[in-house]
Image (cartoon, helix red, strand yellow):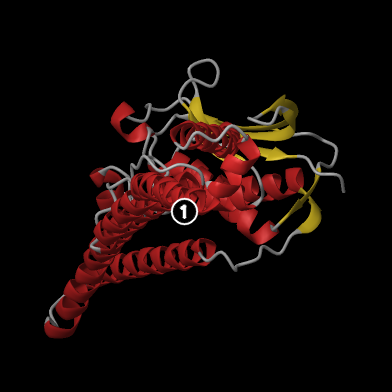
Amino acid sequence: MKNKKDKRKKRLQNYVIFLFFICIFLGLLLDHVMDFLVGLFAGWNQVNNMEEARIRFGDISQIIGGVSTGIVLIVIGVYCYRRLKKKVTQPIEKLAASMREVSKGNLAVRASTDGGFEIGEIQETFNRMVEELEHAKKLREITEQKNQQLYAGIAHDLKTPMTMILGYAKVLVQNQDVSEEDKNRYIKIIIEQTEHTNALLDSLLAYARLENKSYQLKKERNDIAECLRACAANCYPLLEEAGISLELALPEEAVWYLFDEVEMKRVFTNLLTNVVRHNPPQTFCIIQMEKAKGGDKEKEVIQIVIADNGPKIPVNLQKNIFDSFVVGDDSRNTKNGSGLGLSVSKKIVERHGGRLYYVDDWKDGYKGFMAELYLQKL
């Protein structure tokens, strides 16, 4: 961009210099023409004194000078008009045509003119503006597509439990001959589906809250290792019931970090719940935390890994695993997955200035999720 501006300035300077020398040349040429005409007049009228010839030729020279000046001005005017039309009028007309296309919604158009100087800068500014509009349009389309996917997922995941709750409630109300055993089983299913619906709505609220840019995390200086240890303890009965063995590799000393404890507990709980939902019994789960050099910024980070040796995530799901409602059908239909847990977790970690990503082969065949939180000066 700067080089183009420099080239235009150089062309403008050369153009001004060219006009300056043209004016000097025309002035010298006019003087020589006048001397030639005076000499011709003196010879024609047999006048030996050039000064006398100049005086006698004065009236005629004024007429000739006026005509010559007029001719020169006409030539310069025609030349300037042609240059103005080529370098200003036509480029402006092309720019106006491009603007009309953009106003119709055609963002693929780009202005291309032969104008120089300021016209070129206007053209570049216009093209850059159209590119930004096109980029904004694509982002809006992606957002709309994600929202449609989100609404469809919400409808799907709410319809299933609500249908089950309504169905079993009708059986209990309309059929008085239900045995006590079946009644207790129906009530248990209703409670489970109600809890699942409540968890889904809670995830939706968290997702909407994190999507709002004005939402501020309530960060406080706390021991993040102790926070992770507490989440592991809370989830231990769930892991034990699913037949999953747990191993902790956490620092004994405090790891101080500025974070929102409520939201970070949501991250750890979501990741541990995923271990239960997507792995068979006799799976081993490892929770590890350590300080290391890593991340895109090559700064000291807190690395938190929640990994297991269960079945790997299918390759076709790995690249979109953090999108809303991107989970397998079996997970959503039979294991009460909401499809929002990983998306919410990623947003929370990113709100803390870190990153969360999937590791397909962490160590010894384990796969899992790694959160990297950049250490701050507290």
The answer to which of 349 and 140 lies nearer the viewer is 140
Would you say 257 lies left or right of 97 here? right
The answer to which of 183 and 321 lies nearer the viewer is 321
Q: Quadrant of residue 294?
A: top right
The image shows residue 331, relative to residue 361, as above or below, that is below
How many numbered discs, if any?
A: 1
Q: Quadrant of residue 200?
A: bottom left
In the rendered image, residue 185, in percent from the top left (x then y), is placed at 27, 65
The image shows residue 276, relative to residue 269, as above or below, that is above
In the rendered image, residue 344, in percent from the top left (x then y), is placed at 49, 54
Secondary element under disc 1, as helix, strand or loop, is helix
The amino acid type, in three-letter code, at marker 1 is Gly
The answer to which of 224 and 358 lies nearer the viewer is 358
Q: Residues within 10 Å of mark 1 (few under 14, many from 20)?
A: few
Which residue extends farthest top? 364
Question: At 38% from the left edge and 34% from the top edge, which residue is drawn?
Answer: 319
The residue indicated by pointer 1 is 66
The image shows residue 30, relative to residue 129, as above or below, that is above
In the rendered image, residue 242, in percent from the top left (x then y), is placed at 43, 42
The answer to whether one can see residue 337 in this image is: no
The answer to whether one can see residue 90 in this image is: yes
Q: Quadrant of residue 18?
A: top right
Quick one: quadrant of the N terminus?
top right
The image shows residue 326, relative to residue 97, as above or below, that is above
Question: At 37% from the left edge and 27% from the top edge, which residue is drawn?
Answer: 311
The answer to which of 351 and 82 lies nearer the viewer is 82
Question: At 78% from the left edge and 34% from the top edge, which residue is drawn?
Answer: 251
In the rendered image, residue 359, in percent from the top left (x then y), is placed at 50, 27
